[in-house]
Amino acid sequence: MDRQEGMELLKTNGWLSAAPAEFQQAILSRSDWRRFDAGAPIQAGGEDDGELIGLARGVIAIRTILGRADTPLMHLAHPVFWFGYVPILTGRPRRLVADARTPVWLAQVPQAAVKALLVERPEWWRHLMQLSIIYGDVSQTVAADLLIRDSERRCAAVLLRLGAVRFASSRDSEPVDVLVTQHDLAGAANLSRNSAGAMVQRLKARGLIAPGYRGMTIGAPAALRAFVDEE
C-alpha cells in the first residue's frame, strides 16, 4: 500500500472522516508513512511521549499494561483505527502494548507536531477529543463482553469483536476470518484453554464457526451475533 492510498483511507474512514477537510489535511500532512512486518512491536506501553497512529491496513494485537504482567490479548484492531494518543490528551504514559498481527501500514504523527498544531489552532482540540469517546466505546464493549455469564456466548461475543464484526455491518452475511488462536481466544474471553476449546467445538457443532490452523472463520456474523443476543 502506498502513502497516497493510505492517506485516502484514513481520511475517508473512521475518526478523521467526521472532521473538517482542513483538519484532515493538517494531521495527515504531518504524518510519517510506515510499514511493519507481522510480529513487529509498534508500541511498548508505558512511554511518556505519545504519537497519533492511524492504522490503514492490517491487524494489530493490543494488550493493556494496567493489569498483571501476564495480561493476555485484549483486542484486535482493524482499519481504520487510531491509537497512541493518550499522552497527548492527558500527559500520562501510554496504556497499550501494540504488536503487528499481520503486515501493517500506518501513519504516525509525532506528539510535538500535534501539540504545535493545537497551539496554532486551539479550536481543533474538540476534534482530537473525539478519540477519547471512541476509546471509551471500545473499552466498554470489551467490558460488556466479559460480563456475559454464559461461557459459550461470551466466547462467541469476544470472537465477533476480535473479527471487527461485533455489531451489525456490511459483512454480516459473508465469512470472516479472525486471526486468533484458541489460546488467544481463551485469554481474551477469560476462560481456561480447555474451556475455550470446548466452547469452540460447541460453536463449530452449531455451524457458526470453523476453527483452522492459524485462526477461526465466522460463517456469518449476523448468525453468531443472534446466538450471543438471544434470551
Image: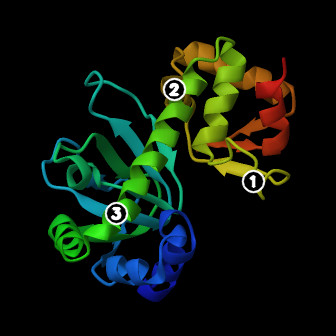
Q: Nearer the viewer, residue 161 or 112?
A: 112
**How far apart, in angstroms, are the residues tagged by discs 1 and 2?**
21 Å
Q: Nearer the viewer, residue 193 or 130?
A: 130
Q: Position of residue 176 (x, y in %)?
A: 72, 51
Q: Residue at x 76, y 47 (%)?
A: 168
Marks 1 and 3, the one that precedes in the sequence: 3
**How far apart, in angstroms, are the residues tagged by discs 1 and 3?**
24 Å
In the rendered image, the residue lying farthest to the front is 123
Residue kind at label 3, given as amino acid type:
Ile
Seen in the picture, residue 204 relative to 215 is either above or below; the reply is above
Marks 1 and 2, the one that precedes in the sequence: 2
Instruction: Answer whether residue 169 is visible to the viewer in this image.
Output: yes
Q: Residue at x 21, y 50 (%)?
A: 87
Q: Position of residue 3 (x, y in %)?
A: 42, 84
Seen in the picture, residue 18 relative to 137 is either above or below; the reply is below
Which numbered dot is residue 214? none
Q: Position of residue 30 (x, y in %)?
A: 27, 80
**How far apart, in angstroms, are the residues tagged by discs 3 and 2?**
24 Å
* Left or right, 229 with reference to 76: right
Q: Position of residue 108 (x, y in %)?
A: 30, 69
Q: Residues within 10 Å of mark 3 (few under 14, many from 20)?
A: many
Marks 3 and 2, the one that precedes in the sequence: 3
The residue under label 2 is: 143
**Quadrant of res 217:** top right
Q: Residues within 10 Å of mark 2 (few under 14, many from 20)?
A: few
Which numbered dot is residue 169? 1
The residue under label 3 is: 53
Seen in the picture, residue 195 relative to 5 is either above or below; the reply is above
* Left or right, 149 with reference to 85: right
Residue kind at label 2, given as amino acid type:
Ala
